[in-house]
Every structure is written in structure tokens, then in C-alpha cells.
Image (spheres, rainbow, N blue to C red):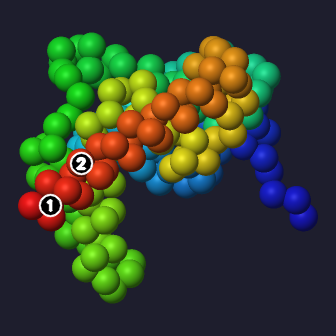
Amino acid sequence: MDPVTDNELMFLVRDGDVGKLAILFERHHLKLFNFFVKMTGNRELSEDLVQEVFLRILKYRQTYRGDSHFALWLYRIARNAHADHFRKKHAVDFNDEQLEGQQSNDPLPIDTIEYGQQIDLLHRALAQLPHDKREVLVLSRFQELKYHEIADLLNCTVGTIKLRVHRAIKELRTAFYALTNEKLS
């Protein structure tokens, strides 16, 4: 028996079977949460934004056309929810102090302290990137969207996305090594 696709589930939700939204939530809430954590640096806010996205899906379900993969529609809503939140709160992007306060107390998946320190430095370096550069890296590297999907989401060409990702990686590398040298000093 073939599993029901996300698009098929969303069509059912759109047509009134709102209980199917629970399946979409189970499939996507963790990736969406991780997206928001990497964009905001705030776990509590990220949980709120995930809830906001699924409330918006429910509210605007009649607008779903299924022209592309459900995940692209989901990330459009997520980007709008993120932007709306910061517009309402007149907030700015997070800084290192906020990130340090949001570190998880969960045990590390790998038992080496050095690995954990490297990950911490990477997250701090990511936090230093401008919003647009951080967003393309999170979408391409952490959310594993393909360049053509990101281009569709951001309404630009694949070439533009490749260039943005390349530049963002260079800037991330610079920020990471600056933090590494700072830590070694």
C-alpha cells in the first residue's frame, strides 16, 4: 500500500478533512522547528512559530492549489510567519547572548566534547550571518531543499541561489574561523 503524499493529504484538508492535518504535522513539525531554531536562535519562539504555521495552514487551506510540493507551500507560510512576528515585535535578528541562553541540555549524540564545541561554534557563526544568507544556508543545508525549490520559494533563479549559497558559505567559514581563533586565544 502506497503512503499518501503530502499533496494528497493537503487536498483532503483543503476539502474539509481537517483531521489529516495531524499527519502533516507529524511529518513536518520537527524540520520546521529546526528551521525556526536556526533562523531565530530561540527554542520557545520556534515552537510558537511552528504552531502559527499550522494554524495558518488550517485558516488558509482553501487557497492550496498543489502547484508545487507541499513542503514549498509550507516554507512560504513559515517565512511569512517569521517575518510577521519580527515585524510585529520590531525585533532584530538574534545575537550570541540569546543563542547561548537557548542551548539545549539534551545529551550530545556523539560523546566527544570537541565535536560539541565545534557545533556550538558553527551555530554561533551561523547566527552572525545576515538573515538572507542564514536563510539560504538553512534551507539548503539543514532543511535539504534543492536549489530549484529554494529559487521557487524565494522567487529568483537557480543561478542566484547558487551564488547566494556560495557567498553565504564563504562568510560562514570566515565567521567560524574568527570564532575558532577567538576561542584559541
Residue 82 lies in what quarter of the image? top left
Q: Mark on residue 178?
A: 2
Secondary element type, mark 2: helix
Report whether 93 appears left or right of 79. Answer: left
Estimate the spatial distance between the alpha carbons at disc 2 and disc 1, rounded to whole Å: 9 Å
Indicate the position of residue 183 as horizontal and vertical percent values: 14, 60
As drawn, the residue found furthest toward the bottom would be 111
What amino acid is found at the position of numbered circle 2 in the picture? Ala
Number of marks present in the image shown: 2
The answer to whether residue 15 of the structure is visible from this angle is no
Residue visible at 70% across and 25% down in the picture: 158
Q: Nearer the viewer, residue 125 or 31?
A: 125
Q: Nearer the viewer, residue 136 or 162?
A: 162
Quarter of the image with the N terminus is bottom right
Indicate the position of residue 161 as horizontal and vertical percent values: 61, 26
The answer to whether residue 166 of the structure is visible from this angle is yes
Q: Residues within 10 Å of mark 1 (few under 14, many from 20)?
A: few
Residue visible at 23% across and 14% down in the picture: 88
Indicate the position of residue 23 as horizontal and vertical percent values: 62, 51
Residue visible at 51% across and 50% down in the picture: 142
Q: Earlier in the sequence, mark 2 or mark 1?
A: 2
Is residue 139 shown above or below 91?
Answer: below
What amino acid is found at the position of numbered circle 1 in the picture? Lys
Residue visible at 20% across and 34% down in the picture: 94
- The residue carrying mark 1 is 183
Is residue 69 shown above or below 88?
Answer: below
Report whether 162 appears left or right of 116. Answer: right
Report whether 54 appears left or right of 84. Answer: right
Q: Nearer the viewer, residue 153 or 9?
A: 153
Is residue 167 shown above or below 123?
Answer: above
Q: Residues within 10 Å of mark 2 (few under 14, many from 20)?
A: some
Residue 150 lies in what quarter of the image? top right
